[in-house]
Image (cartoon, grey):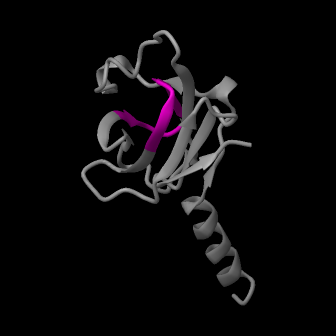
Amino acid sequence: MRRVVPLIALTALAACSTSPVPLSRATSTPSERIFSPTLAKTSDGAQKITIVRDSGLKGSAFYTTVYVDGVRAADVDTSEAVRIYLQPGVHILSAGPRGMSTGPSVPVTVPSATTQYRISEGLFLLPAE
């Protein structure tokens, strides 16, 4: 019994964690969940930014909404990637469970050396490594 309790605790923690998804294994977010058509299309001077949501159970019951400059851009499911095109300048990216508050905002100055981000735990936007 003494060994079973820690094993159950570790299993529960592992079930709640999320894992990064390589871009090559992520599926594209369907167009019906992309709400800002201007961000979804390339244009002169725009830089492509890719956001990939982690796999895992934590937060998987809800889509994660991605916001660009406070505007709802897309609802992303686990293991999905959404590509947005940003014009030069400073932009604010944020994400959070649909209909709830977002995690910390991430300022992005385009052009940017970082072009790929990941959504961890359905809430946090982190530069992809």
Q: Position of residue 12 (x, y in %)?
A: 58, 69
**Quadrant in which the N terminus appears:** bottom right
Residue 75 x/y as whole percent: 35, 36
Q: Residue at x 56, y 28 (%)?
A: 49
Vertical side of 92 occupied by 87: above or below: above
**Residue at the image point whose x is 56% and y is 29% from the top:** 50
Q: Is residue 84 left or right of residue 62?
A: right
Looking at the image, which is closer to me, 28 or 42?
42
Looking at the image, which is closer to me, 102 or 57? 102
Outermost bottom residue: 2
Q: Is residue 91 magenta?
A: yes
Find out whether residue 128 is within the magenta segment: no
Expressed as whole percent of the image width and height from the top left, the position of residue 35 reads: 28, 27
Q: Quadrant of the C terminus?
A: top right
Judging depth in this view, the residue of 11 and 90 nearest the camera is 90
Q: In which quadrant of the rendered view does residue 54 lie?
A: top right
Residue 42 to residue 59: above or below: above
Q: Residue furthest front?
A: 89
Q: Quadrant of residue 37?
A: top left
Looking at the rendering, the stretch of residues picked out in magenta corresponds to 74-92
Asked if residue 51 is positioned above or below residue 3 in the image, the reply reads above
Q: Residue at x 46, y 10 (%)?
A: 43
